[in-house]
Amino acid sequence: MSTAAAKPVSYRDALNQALREELARDPDVFLLGEDIGRFDGAFKVTRGLLEEFGEARVVDTPISEAGFTGLAIGAAMAGLRPVVEIMTVNFVILALDQIVNNAAKIHYMFGGQASVPIVLRMPGGGGHQLAAQHSQTLDAWLAHVPGLKVVCPSTPEDAKGLLKTAIRDDDPVIFLENEGLYGKKGPVGGPDDLIPFGQAVVRRPGTHCTVIAHSRMVWVALQAAEELAAHGVEAEVIDPRTLRPLDLETLANSVRRTGHAVIVDEGWPEYGISAGLATHLYEACFDWLDAPIGRVNCADVPMPYAKNLEQAALPTPSDVVAAVLANIGRRVA
Amino acid sequence: MSPDATTQHADMRTMFRSMILIRRFEERASEEYMAGRIGGFLHLAIGEEAAVVGTVTALRPDDPLTSTYREHGQALARGTDPRAVMAELLGKSTGLCGGRGGSMHLMDKERAFYGGYGIVGGSIPLGLGLAYAIRYRGGDQVAVTMFGDGATNQGVVAECFNMAGLWDLPIVFLILNNQYGMGTSLERSAAEADLYTRAEAYGIPAWKVDGMDVLAVRDAVTEAARIAREERNPACVELLAYRYRGHSMSDPDTVRDADEKERWRARDPLITFERVLLGEAIMTADEIATMKDEVQVVVDDAAAFAEESPEVPVSDLADGVYAHPWNDNPRGGVLMP
C-alpha cells in the first residue's frame, strides 16, 4: 500500500473516493442512478460529486431501473464507462432483463464486436428491520451468469481498490456493497492502488478450520474466530473478494491444510453461493476433508420484520462458532 | 435532367436493389432452413422491405441503429456482406458474429448496426444509451431504434419514452407495426391502436405513415432524423406494414385471415415501387430484370459461401465470454496501470 493510507476512512467514503478519482481521471466515466445527485445517494456514497462534476456526469434518473440500466449498457457499447447505482439490490430484479439478456451476452453473442464496460453498484443485506422486500442478498442470482464479473468487498480498502478496477474493466461488473458496511472504517489505498479481481485474501490465519466468508459475513466470521480462539480453536478466515472470478486456489490450499471448511453466506442456503463454493471445494479437496463442509446461511425464509425474528434469520458469530466446533468435533463446556 | 433528380433517381435504384436483395436473401434463407441447414428460429421480414430500406436510406451511415430479432434486412441495407450474414445464419466460423449469434443476433458495429436482440422491447434502452453517448460526446449522429407493435406493450418502452423526452435525447423510435405480436393481433393487445400516440404522451413528436411505401417511409424517417439531429429532440414514427410469412418459420400462419393476407399482398412494396420506377421512367423493364438477376447471383454466392464455410471449432466454445478474461491478468501487482 503506497500513499494516503494513514487516516481511517469509512467504506462509504472509500467508495466516494474511488468514484471521485475515476471521474477526474477519465472523462468517459459518468454516474447515473436514482437520487445520486442532489440527494447525494440513498446511502450518501455519491456525496458532493454532482457539485464537483456537474449534471452531465452525475445523472439523477427517474425510477426506471430497467430503462436506465439498459441506457447505461447502450452507452457502454458506444465506449463510455457508466457507473450505475441501483439503490438497493432488491431493485436490481427490475433490471435483470437488461443485465442478464443484454450486458452479459453482448460481447459473446455478437462475436466480440462490442464490449460492455459498465459497473452496477448495489447494496444488499439485512439487519435493519426493513422486512422481506428490502433485506435480500441476491449474490447467487448474479454470480450464476457467465459474462458478468461479481465483486463483493468487505473492507474500505477493498471497496476503493476493487471499484477502481471495476470501472477500468472492459466487462460488465456487478459491484455488491452491503448496507451494514457503509460505516466500517479502515485504511484505504491511493489513486493508483488497484486491487485485481480473482485474488482471495486471508483475513486471519489459522490451522484448525477454514472459514470462507464474503462481504459483511467476513466480519461475522472474524468475530467468531476471536471467540473460537478463546477456546483454543484457530480458524483461518478467507475472504474471496470476488465471486466471479473466484480464486479457488487460495480457498482450496487452505482447506487442504486444515481439513475442515465452514462457509458463511448471508444469502439463502438453497442453490446459492455457499452451495456453489462447497461444490468447488468437494471437487478440489475431497480427499483432504476430515468432515463434511459446514454452511451457515440466512434462514430459508423471506426476511421477517420483527427484530427478534430477523436476528434469528441472519448468520451470527455464535452460529459460526457452533458450526466450526461441530465441524472439528469439539464441544465447549 | 437536373443533378438533383439524377441523384434522386440513383438513390431510388439503390433502394430498389436493396429491397430485392432482402427479399431474395430471405427467400433463400427460408430454403436453407427447410433444408435443415439453418437451426433455431428464423424470422422473415418478407413484406416489410419498404420499412427497412426506407429507414436505412434516410439515415447517415454513422447513425447507430438497433433492431429486433427480425433484422437480416437492416444488416443487408446497411451494406453488410451477404456472405457474412448467410454464414451466420448457418452457424459458420465465417459468420458475421462467428456463429455465436445466429439469425436473431446480427451485429455490424463497423457499419453502426448495433444489433438484433431477441427479447421483445429489450433493445430499446440500448438505443437510448447510444443516443446518450452521442449527446455526451457532442456528436451530431442520431440513434435509431426499431421495434415492433408487440414491444410497445412492454413497460420499459414507457420508461424510454419518458427519459428521451425528459433529457431531449437525439433518438428516433421506429415502431414497425406489422399488426401482429406473434399470433395476437393489434386489436386484441392494444387499448389504443394508434401506437405512436404513446410517444406523444411524453412530448415526443410522433406520427404514422404507410410502411409499405418505401418513399413515404424514407421521407418520414428523414424528417424524424432531422428533428433528432437539428432540434436535438426525440421523434417517433409508426410504420404500418405487414409480414407475409408467419411469425417465424415454425409458425404455420393459420391465425391470420386469408383475405387480409391477400389484401396486403396486393400492396407488395416491391411491386408497387417497381411500378413507380417504370411509370416515372427511372428504370426500364430490362434494367429491372438485369438487376434482379444480378441480385440473385449475389444471394446464390452468399449461400454457396456459407454452405462451404467451415464450422466453428468446438475448442473456441468459451472464447469471447469476456472482453478481458481474468486468466490474462497477472497475479499480484497493479491490474491495469
Image (cartoon, rainbow, N blue to C red):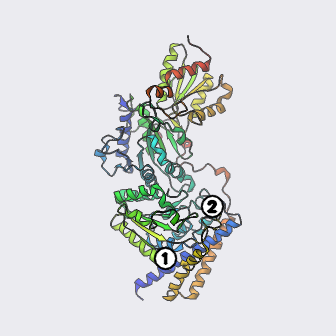
Can you tell which mark lies on residue B41?
2
Can you tell which mark lies on residue B214?
1
Q: Residue furthest top?
A: A333
In which quadrant of the rendered view does residue A188 lie?
A: top left
In which quadrant of the rendered view does residue A263 lie?
A: top right
In terms of depth relative to the viewer, which is nearer, A45 or B240?
B240
Q: In percent of the image, x 49 and y 77: which residue is there? A: B213
How packed mark 2 is, by other alpha carbons closer than 10 Å (few <14, some 14-19, many 20 or more), is some
Horizontal arrangement in the rendering, residue A26 relative to residue A274 (left or right) = left
The location of residue B53, given as percent across then percent down, is: 50, 73
| Label 1: chain letter | B
Work out whether A243 lies above or below A238: below
Q: In percent of the image, x 35 and y 31: which residue is there? A: A9
Horizontal arrangement in the rendering, residue B284 relative to residue B233 (left or right) = right
Local secondary structure at mark 1: helix
Work out whether A211 lies above or below B245: above
